[in-house]
């Protein structure tokens, strides 16, 4: 199902059991709900409050609230089933179905969020224990012939044609979601579908646990400073503090700790002059999802087998067809053609860049190098870039104080979209503590909270949390998660405020310096803030269409578009001042940054295309190319001509690519490059009219950010650009084609 009610949330994978189990679980849930009501318990996971009470959201409470929410959802579904054709309206059928599991979507969304930012074994066990009940609910929706009959009958009523375009679109989306989820399948196939989805849910949880646990398990302690030659003072200070925090070293006898957080190990692979240290770090990265009890290869194999069977069961040739047939790309074959065509255009430049890099390394090492040691790749690319542009990216860091970056980013989008940002007082509470009035509770002391206001109307558009720094209990990467979209107002009133969170793992402060971001950190936060603006500026007739609830291969357009402001003087001027002197970043340093932007663009593109290629191949041709074979071997054979020539092969990145196994990018990783093409094209309008032009910003807000999924993505894009996308826009911007 694709509606919010039926799928619950994009981050909660609901699966299924047999129909008998579904009925038994429904009865059990109803009994639990009656007990909950009798005890007059509160439900912090879905209480009707502006902000969540995170300290009350214990794993045990999550279980209780999930069951209470399930009972509410079952009761509402039963009420819809009693609607006769004569009684049916949009409100008591389609809208009621959309709202039926509001509480369930919220409690599961909050549990998923907490597992992403404050992971612990108790929470994992609670989530895993709920799988049978959650999957039974999903199975009951698909299997509910009375519900499907009501929806089909209502969709055929003449009053549907009198609805607004957004409501007509939602009616069709609801019908499509039932069909796509197998509502018309015979009973035996519905039962098998439920079994497949139950097992997939268990497997994806295991995959994510293996990635997190293996990431946290690896650490490298360095006691000889010479082994870290080339590392910056800031990095050394942070690594020493990390070591001391874990009981290693002291001021007199320092030690330095390297972890698999990207800001730690990634910096070593880029900057450390000692090959042996780089090699140990590269080998450490290769343990993620690849060793001992955390080996994800059998998990990936089973996931692919089940996804292939599921797609066939639902009448699709491949799983990629199943996931993409209602997206912009329109099918798996089209997605593969997009990736292959991009690669064909990029390959000539990529091969020339390979030749140049091998020549560079040969000159540095005084020997004829035919293959690159993989632990040397980032190191030599970085050195080569520095020499070509006479530019060390570390020169930027003193101008990138975290607070200035955030405030400057706010200034840019305040100007473009006529909105204001204000930090709200916040507090991290212990269980049992009461949150003071006027204070917003957060889940960790480092989390900040910001309110977004429309300057013209004074309306409170939304609030978001910002959690920027790494910790052991937080999963890697950066993301935005909508926590709640505000309900649309009636009779012209503004919608209720939206709620979302922005999470990252960016460079942390040290004892003697504030957090000083790399340019990559800044790109990351601007990227995620594009998603946040999509959430905060959503203004749709229906809550289900709001914000990032768009076609999956369109969702990255705002995020990738917003990265551009980190490369242009007008954007950089808003945040880049020296953290000690207050001086703005010199023009010559900005010029060097700009010139370095498209260093080795062929290599950069091919790296991204490799991810999209493997993802699609596995979801389209698993039986033919992968089944019964080594995942690592087949990955390397498949991508050999698409990658730099390496002396040693690494384990397949599909062992730890959570996007494609536990996230929403299964058979969808192509969409990063797809949206990058769209964003490069859309940015041509900003460049033409001025990247700080508020009129252009207002047009983008109105045409794209506010509309969400209330219109087809292609139509939304045309509303802004007044034409279809230019498929060559990205490669033209990078100078790879004319």
Image: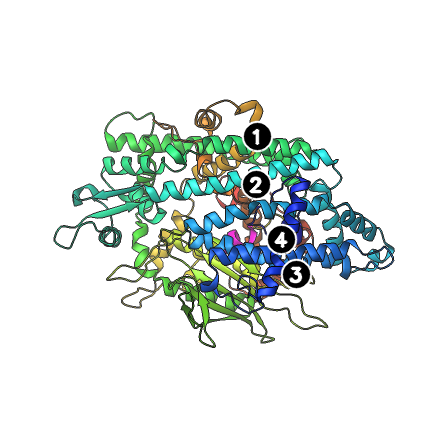
Q: Is residue 154 left or right of residue 271?
A: right
Which quarter of the figure is the C terminus placed in? top right
User: Badge 4: how crowded within 10 Å, few (<14), some, or many (20+)?
Assistant: many
User: Badge 1: how crowded within 10 Å, few (<14), some, or many (20+)?
Assistant: some
Q: Is residue 737 visible?
A: no
In this figure, which residue is indicated by the disc labeled 3? 543
Name the element at disc 2: loop
Q: CA distance from mark 1 to mark 2?
A: 17 Å
- Which of labels 2 and 3 is toward the front? 3
Q: CA distance from mark 2 to mark 3?
A: 25 Å
Q: CA distance from mark 3 to mark 4?
A: 27 Å
Name the element at disc 3: helix
Q: Residue at x 82, y 53 (%)?
A: 154
In this figure, which residue is indicated by the disc labeled 4? 29
In this figure, which residue is indicated by the disc labeled 1? 305
**Among all residues in the image, which is located at the extreme left?**
252
Q: Is residue 446 left or right of residue 160?
A: left
Q: Is residue 557 magenta?
A: yes
Of callouts 3 and 4, the N-terminal one: 4
Is 376 or 220 nearer to us in this picture?
220
User: Badge 2: how crowded within 10 Å, few (<14), some, or many (20+)?
Assistant: many
- Which of labels 1 and 2 is toward the front? 1
Q: CA distance from mark 1 to mark 4?
A: 32 Å
Vertical position of residue 280 compared to residue 721: above or below: above
> What is the number of the mark on residue 668?
2
Query: Disc 2 vs disc 3: Cβ atoms closer than 8 Å?
Result: no
Which region shows up in magenta? Answer: 556-564
Name the element at disc 1: helix
- In the image, residue 334 lies at what x, y percent? 63, 35
Of callouts 2 and 3, the N-terminal one: 3
């Amino acid at each position: 199902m694709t509606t919010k009610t039926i799928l619950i949330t994009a981050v909660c994978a609901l699966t299924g059991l047999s129909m008998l189990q579904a009925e038994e679980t429904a009865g059990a849930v109803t009994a639990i709900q009656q007990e909950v009501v009798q005890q007059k318990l509160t439900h912090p996971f879905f209480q009707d409050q502006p902000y969540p009470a995170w300290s009350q959201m214990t794993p045990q409470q999550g279980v209780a609230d999930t069951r209470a929410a399930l009972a509410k959802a079952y009761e509402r579904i039963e009420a819809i089933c009693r609607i006769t054709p004569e009684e049916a309206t949009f409100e008591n059928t389609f809208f009621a179905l959309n709202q039926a599991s509001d509480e369930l979507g919220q409690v599961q969304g909050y549990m998923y969020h907490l597992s992403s930012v404050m992971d612990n074994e108790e929470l994992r066990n609670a989530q895993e224990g709920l799988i049978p009940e959650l999957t039974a609910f999903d199975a009951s929706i698909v299997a509910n012939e009375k519900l499907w009959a009501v929806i089909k009958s209502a969709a055929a009523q003449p009053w549907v044609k009198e609805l607004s375009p957004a409501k007509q679109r939602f009616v069709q989306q609801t019908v499509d979601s039932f069909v796509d989820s197998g509502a018309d399948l015979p009973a035996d196939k519905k039962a098998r579908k439920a079994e497949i989805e139950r097992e997939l849910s268990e497997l994806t949880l295991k995959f994510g646990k293996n990635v997190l646990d293996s990431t946290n398990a690896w650490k490298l302690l360095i006691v000889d400073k010479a082994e870290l030659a080339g590392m910056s003072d800031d990095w050394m200070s942070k690594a020493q503090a990390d070591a001391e925090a874990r009981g290693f070293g002291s001021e007199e006898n320092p030690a330095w700790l390297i972890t698999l957080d990207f800001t730690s190990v990634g910096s070593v692979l880029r900057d450390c002059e000692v090959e042996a240290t780089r090699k140990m770090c590269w080998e450490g990265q290769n343990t993620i999802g690849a060793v001992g009890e955390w080996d994800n290869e059998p998990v990936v194999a089973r996931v692919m087998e089940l996804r292939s069977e599921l797609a066939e069961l639902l009448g699709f040739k491949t799983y990629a067809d199943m996931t993409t047939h209602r997206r912009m790309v329109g099918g798996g074959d089209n997605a593969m053609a997009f990736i292959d065509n991009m690669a064909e255009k990029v390959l000539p430049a990529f091969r020339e860049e390979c030749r140049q890099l091998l020549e560079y390394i040969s000159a540095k090492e005084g020997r004829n190098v035919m293959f690159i040691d993989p632990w040397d790749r980032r190191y030599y690319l970085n050195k080569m870039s520095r020499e070509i542009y006479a530019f060390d990216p570390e020169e930027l860091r003193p101008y990138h104080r975290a607070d200035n970056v955030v405030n400057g980013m706010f200034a840019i989008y305040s100007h473009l979209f006529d909105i204001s940002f204000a930090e709200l007082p916040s507090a991290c509470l212990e269980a049992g503590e009461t949150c003071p009035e006027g204070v917003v509770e957060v889940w960790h002391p480092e989390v900040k909270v910001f309110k977004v206001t429309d300057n013209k109307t004074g309306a409170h558009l939304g609030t978001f949390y910002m959690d920027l720094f790494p910790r052991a209990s937080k999963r890697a990467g950066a993301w935005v998660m909508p926590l709640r979209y505000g309900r649309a107002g009636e009779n012209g009133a503004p919608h209720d405020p939206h709620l979302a969170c922005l999470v990252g793992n960016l460079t942390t402060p040290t004892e003697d310096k504030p957090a000083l971001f790399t340019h990559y950190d800044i790109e990351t936060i601007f990227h995620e803030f594009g998603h946040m603006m999509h959430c905060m500026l959503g203004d749709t007739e229906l809550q289900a269409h709001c914000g990032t609830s768009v076609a999956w291969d369109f969702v990255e357009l705002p995020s990738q578009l917003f990265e551009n402001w980190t490369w242009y003087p007008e954007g950089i001027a808003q945040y880049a001042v020296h953290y000690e002197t207050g001086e703005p970043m010199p023009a010559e340093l900005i010029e060097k940054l700009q010139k370095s932007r498209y260093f080795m663009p062929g290599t950069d593109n091919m790296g991204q295309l490799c991810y999209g290629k493997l993802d699609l191949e596995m979801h389209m041709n698993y039986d033919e190319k992968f089944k019964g074979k080594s995942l690592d071997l087949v990955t390397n054979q498949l991508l050999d001509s698409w990658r730099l020539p390496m002396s040693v092969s690494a384990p397949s990145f599909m062992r730890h690519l959570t996007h494609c196994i536990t996230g929403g990018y299964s058979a969808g990783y192509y969409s990063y490059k797809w949206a990058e093409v769209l964003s490069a094209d859309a940015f041509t309008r900003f460049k033409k009219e001025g990247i700080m032009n508020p009129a252009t910003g207002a047009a983008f807000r109105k045409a794209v950010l506010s509309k969400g999924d209330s219109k087809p993505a292609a139509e939304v894009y045309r509303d802004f650009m007044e034409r279809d996308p230019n498929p060559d826009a990205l490669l033209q911007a990078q100078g790879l084609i004319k």
